[in-house]
Amino acid sequence: MIVPIAKGGSDSYENLITTSMENNLLKFNFLLNEIEFVIKEKGNLKNWNGLIDWYKSYIQDKSIEFFDDSMKRWHNALIRYEKENGEI
């Protein structure tokens, strides 16, 4: 079960899912079942990887100071995922 950090959930890979900014704002700090959000099956990254390719290109010339804490966590999660599963 995904638990928002604001409700005591961990900031770990197992407690993270991706969504649009609009859905994330709607979700706020609710549990997914409280607002009837349904987690969809994981897609195929070869068919669509969000904007990961764009993101990697965009950050190439940026220093780590460029990122706020939230972006640092997201960036580190991407790096960790790619180390464990191969490059996206």
Image: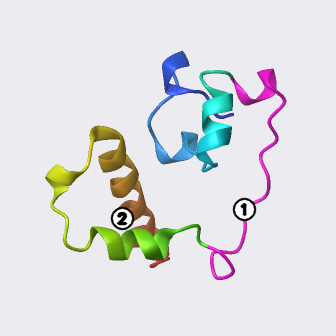
Label annotation for residue 23:
none
Residue 70, image x, y percentages: 36, 40
Residue numbers of the magenta segment: 31-48
Q: Secondary structure at mark 2?
A: helix
In the image, residue 40 lies in the stretch drawn in magenta: yes
In the picture, the quarter occupied by the N terminus is: top right
Task: State the image coordinates of residue 18 (x, y, percent, origin top left).
Answer: 60, 50
Where 34 falls versus 83 (above or below)? Answer: above
Residue 50 screen position, x and y as percent: 58, 67
Camera-side residue of 72 and 79: 72
Residue at 56 percent across and 39 percent down: it is 15
| 14 vs 45: above or below | above
Secondary structure category for the residue under label 1: loop
Task: Pick out the residue farthest to the top.
Answer: 7
User: Which is nearer the eye, 8 or 53?
Assistant: 53
Q: Residue at x 46, y 76 (%)?
A: 53
Relative to 11, does residue 56 appear above or below in the rendering? below
Real-space CA distance between mark 1 and mark 2, rounded to the nearest whole angstrom: 19 Å
Is residue 40 shown left or right of residue 27? Answer: right
Badge number at residue 42: 1
Residue 3 image-quadrant placement: top right
Q: Check residue 79 in the rendering and tell me which mark sits there, or answer none.
A: 2
Q: Main secondary structure of the magenta part?
A: loop
Amino acid type assigned to the residue bearing label 2 in the image? Ile
In this figure, what is the number of numbered marks? 2
> Disc 1, disc 2: CB below 8 Å?
no
Residue 46 vs 72, above or below: the answer is: below
Q: How far across and how far down the image is residue 43, in percent?
A: 73, 67
- Left or right, 46 with respect to 88, comes to right
Q: Quadrant of residue 63?
A: bottom left
